[in-house]
Amino acid sequence: MEDRTDFENADKGFVGTASQTEIKDASGRVVWDLDAYAFLDGPCPDTANPSLWRQSQLTAKHGLYQVADGIYQVRGFDLSNVSFVEGDTGVIVVDPLLSTECAAAALALYREHRGDRPVTAVIYSHSHADHFGGVRGVVPDGAGIPVIAPAGFLEHAVAENVYAGTAMNRRAIFMYGAELPRNAAGQIGAGLGPTTSTGTISLIEPTLSITETGQEETVDGVRIVFQLTPGTEAPAEMNFSFPGKRALCMAENATHNLHNILTLRGALVRDPRVWARYLTEAIEMFAGRSDVLFASHHWPTWGTGELTRFLREQRDLYAYLHDQTLRMLNQGCTGIEIAEMIELPPALERAWHARGYYGSVSHNVKAVYQRYMGWFDGNPAHLWELPPEESARRHVEFMGGVASVLPKARAAFEAGELRWAAQVLNYVVFAEPGAMEARELLAKVYDALGQGSENGTWRNYYLQGAAELRGDKRTGTLDSSSPDVLMALSVEQVFDSIAIRVDGPRAWEHRLAVDWNFTDLKDEVRLTLANGVLTQSRAHDGTPADLTLTLTKPQLLRLVATQDLGDIQTDGDPGALTTLFGLLDDVDRDFDIVTP
């Protein structure tokens, strides 16, 4: 704790911060409050892990900072950072935050201190929404400037937010604690940053794709060298260097915490093996030619030697977790067992930037196991277990009923056996959701587990679970399926999003075909419903469709949203479309998690 290097680096280059602490949307709703974490200025209380408290103090710092000559960052205005690289005629914006309102406020702060420079380009480092969602806050309509992104960016950016977006957004409320109160007993941060803003998410499609490592572009007079890193922290991601400024941007591949192999909100499992190899490649390509390393979260690292050591330790962190998990699973250990057994090497255990504030050793090891072995641990008893509610009822019955379980669970809680108390009380809540004494006791267990956690997302998950057990269940304010994201969907992705809503059993006996002729795309697609499956094809056997629609892609999006044909040209039976829409399930954005 006496090592203050991170605090010195987090304060280095401070220029100033905003005088207006609340960032609001057009309706006046506050989407970000710069003062919300002012309570972190004090000493760590008993309701927080001292290590996470320290990290939260660092991530709560906000303002404009100079990183290098002509490179600035605004930090603390969202979960992520936005960077400004000055060119010959204006400024290049790197990763414009999650919300347009926060991005606009960050740009205004930059301009307040650096002049009213026009935005001459935008770079998306990767395909997560907190690195592109605010783009319309810095780029006016019709600006016609380059928007640069790694190959595959658009496909992954929109697919993640649509296919499983509803479930991910619900779980993100738990992961980031966005609905929890900001105080010493509540939400104090997420490890990677304070939390997610709740403003407007936008998207401007890239105009220039980076397709290979070593590709160079000169943008507004600034030379940039790119390194593609697909399959690391995001499916489409890239690092890049500014050789003329001896500055290296590591996107989200090397930050001041252990990152996630699989996030608690859900995502595709990442590959720590290639992650480590891309970090080795970054060291070889860029480290010796750089004086400062900055990223899309946290604070920079200065000095060639220091940033090289930082990258090597980050590389070793992911490689160690990967290799040791594989070593132990090949000895017959399961993911849960490996997570309890594994220990980091002393040098990594001592490194602040390797601490599990966002990803944890425990859930990352389980993710590596899942990547290679799947959900099944090989034990036949786990192959066909009872579903949670029935299993809970049987467990509680075997343990003598609720009246017998509660005193034992309370004793476990008072003895500090929190993990066991949580497991047992969860059985009771799922067996008898109306057992209020059990719900309150489980909420207290979650409070204790959360407030003791070094991992920010674990803390938030436990505390949000406690809040919902106590009846404080709020509708989430974050919706990643914004109009810009939906407009960026391909026709194939739009039809995929319909297919995953088909209620299979209700659709078993239905057969229909709808042809879609897109005049703006010069494309024709046939949707066929059979056996409860909605398939799409561009070639078919020539049999007539039940309905043919002639339309544009914007008309398709409006039709999906409203289920109203409007002015769309039709030929055939419109009832076919009515039948299809009638077979779609509604999504539940607020489904239960801690109760059945």
Image (spheres, grey):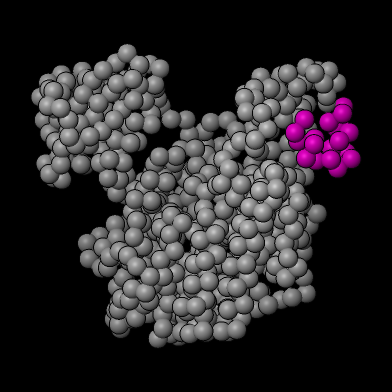
- 381 or 471, which is in the foreground? 381
- The percent position of residue 566, horizontal first and vertical second, equals 17, 30
Residue 373 appears in view? yes
- Report whether 564 appears left or right of 342: left
Outermost residue on the front side: it is 331
What residue appears at the point 70 percent right and 59 percent down from the top-left corner? 52
Q: Quadrant of the N terminus?
A: bottom right
What residue appears at the point 42 percent right and 73 percent down from the top-left corner? 240
Instruction: Classify residue 550 by image quadrant.
Output: top left
Residue 457 appears in view? no
- The percent position of residue 91, horizontal first and vertical second, equals 35, 76
Magenta span includes 399: no
130 up-or-down from 351: above or below: above
- Report whether 439 appears left or right of 571: right
- 99 or 221, which is in the foreground? 221
Instruction: Classify residue 576 by image quadrant.
Output: top left
Q: Which residues are magenta?
A: 407-424
What residue appears at the point 60 percent right and 84 percent down from the top-left corner? 305
- The percent position of residue 586, horizontal first and vertical second, equals 41, 27
What residue appears at the point 22 percent right and 62 percent down from the top-left corner? 142
- The percent position of residue 271, horizontal first and vertical second, equals 52, 55
